[in-house]
Image (spheres, grey):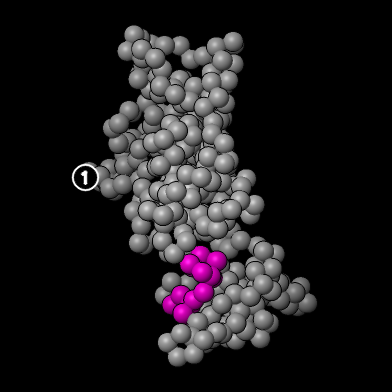
Amino acid sequence: MKIEQDRDRDQDGNRDQNRDYFFLKQFLDSPGQILKRFAGTKTNPKGLDLDAAAKRAVEAQLLARNFIAVNGKGKDRHFAITDAGRAHFANLPVFPPPPPPPDPKLKVFILLNLLGAGDRPVTLKQVKAMLPPAVAKTLGASKESLSALLESLVKDGALLKSSGEGTSPDDRVVFRVTENGKQEILHHRQHGDMVFKLSGSAVNQLLELAAGKPIANATVSHCMPLPAGDQAQNLVALAAASSFSDEELIGEARALMATRGSNGLLPIYELRRHIRKKFGEHAAGLDEFDRKLKRLRGERLDLISLFDRSSFSHDQISEGVQGVGELFFYVRNLR
């Protein structure tokens, strides 16, 4: 009996923490970190048991603990998160908890196969066919878990997902590799027993990404070998030389804020596209752009995550910066 009581008490404690995280995160995802009202009960995640009465009780508890405050009167009345609320949020476990990361070798196996399709969209049915039993066993994968893996790649911005025109459900879901996905291929080793069929065009894309710039006279050969030895070291050096400085990033973001920003918030997809156009694909990729923004966070700029995705296109969302259990979508407070 005591064990059951302790387990119930732990479950209630976890639920209370998850409720706090859900409510406080709404502030951090909103412009100015203020709210007129909290999300309605229909949008509440499963597991929080937030009916109308529970929702009011959580609001009252957050107010009583000085984690939020009520400011203004009448039409100007709004909720604001306090410094104590921010400190409390920083110590809470992420909710919903992020799924375990996919095996890197399985991830890049799928990405490289999709890259081999060129510009053609690949259906879910075709992706499943890439994992015959022997390959799935080698990579520790199953067709049942493949859909979850693909969704994680979409969430990470490595794949674009859209609707097809097939007759079966698996034919009506199609995928394309994004520039971030191509960068991911370069960052992880493939399983030594895997075999791929790649066109010369796909190989050339990999070479260009490794070098950080287009290959001169790329039409000479469509059967160029992958770099090895000294050649690989030269490509790494070229990629490093193509990077851009922190000051250049901050300067470009400040200039872009005037035309593409709103209320002090600059969408990251606007900044990424601008950087790509001015500095090249490598500068706007996962290794250069995303890591630079994360490194500068809190020192030279702030990153604001996105809570409601309904107002933005899939392409815009996919060009955000993936955090731990959240998607950073805006840059603000450049300094």
Residue 297 horizontal side relative to residue 41, left or right: right
Residue drawn 49% across the image and 68% down it = 30
Q: Is residue 194 magenta?
A: no
- Figure check: 108 above or below 172: above
- Figure check: 303 above or below 56: above
Residue 246 horizontal side relative to residue 1, left or right: left
- In the current view of this chain or complex, which residue is farthest to the bottom? 74
Residue drawn 41% across the image and 61% down it = 262
Mark 1 residue crowding within 10 angstroms, few (<14) / some (14–19) / many (20+): few
Front position in the image: 295 or 139 = 295
> Image quadrant of residue 82?
bottom right
- In the current view of this chain or complex, which residue is farthest to the right? 2
**SS state under label 1:** loop
Query: Does residue 158 appear in the picture of this structure?
Result: yes
Q: Is residue 34 magenta?
A: yes
Rendering coords of residue 157 (x, y %): 45, 44
Q: Amino acid at mark 1?
A: Glu
Magenta stretch bounds: 26-40
Residue 103 horizontal side relative to residue 214, left or right: right
Rendering coords of residue 45 (x, y %): 49, 68
Rendering coords of residue 134 (x, y %): 48, 28
Q: Which residue is mark 1?
A: 165
Quarter in which the N terminus is drawn: bottom right
Front position in the image: 239 or 18 = 239
Query: Does residue 324 appear in the picture of this structure?
Result: no
Front position in the image: 95 or 230 = 230
Front position in the image: 118 or 10 = 118
Residue drawn 60% across the image and 82% down it = 69
Total tally of numbered discs in the picture:
1
